[in-house]
Image (spheres, rainbow, N blue to C red):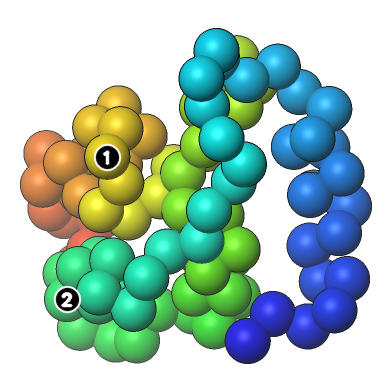
Amino acid sequence: MIAPGEWSGIADLLRRVPMPAGEGPVQGATAEQIASIAGHYEKPLPDVYVRWLRFCNGTPAGPGGLYGAGTSRNRLDALPILRRHPHWARPT
């Protein structure tokens, strides 16, 4: 659950940046989408990252967009990137 106001500053910024035509509001990740990325790691995802994904699961807002997990926008989906760089999921 997202604490009230936890991402309010970012939400305000996301409302201000340009969005491509036809894009709707920022959507959060489902439990299945979060599980899809968590399954690549030996340890649980950091709580703040899980809360972030629940708030914003990838958006094309701004010049480069923000990554998510299991999104419909392949270029903003962290999973294909993780597949190209599997060593990122290994413990150091």
Q: Secondary structure at mark 1?
A: loop
- Image coordinates of residue 45 in percent, x first then y, are 40, 78
Q: Residues within 10 Å of mark 1 (few under 14, many from 20)?
A: few
Which is more N-terminal, label 2 or label 1? 2
**Horizontal side of residue 33 vs 59, given as left or right:** left
**Residue at x 70%, y 17% (from the top left corner):** 18
Residue 69, relative to residue 25: is it above or below?
below
**Quadrant position of the N terminus in the picture:** bottom right
**Horizontal side of residue 78 vs 36, given as left or right:** right
Q: How many marks?
A: 2
Kind of residue at disc 1: Ser
Residue 1, relative to residue 58: is it above or below?
below
Res 92 → quadrant: bottom left
**Residue at x 53%, y 53% (from the top left corner):** 27
Determine which residue is flagged by label 1: 72
In this rendered view, identify the residue nearer to me: 15 or 75: 15
Mark identifier at residue 39: 2
Q: Are marks 1 and 2 in contact (CB under 8 Å)?
A: no
In this rendered view, identify the residue nearer to me: 13 or 82: 13
Residue 70, relative to residue 30: is it above or below?
above
Residue 54 visible? The answer is yes
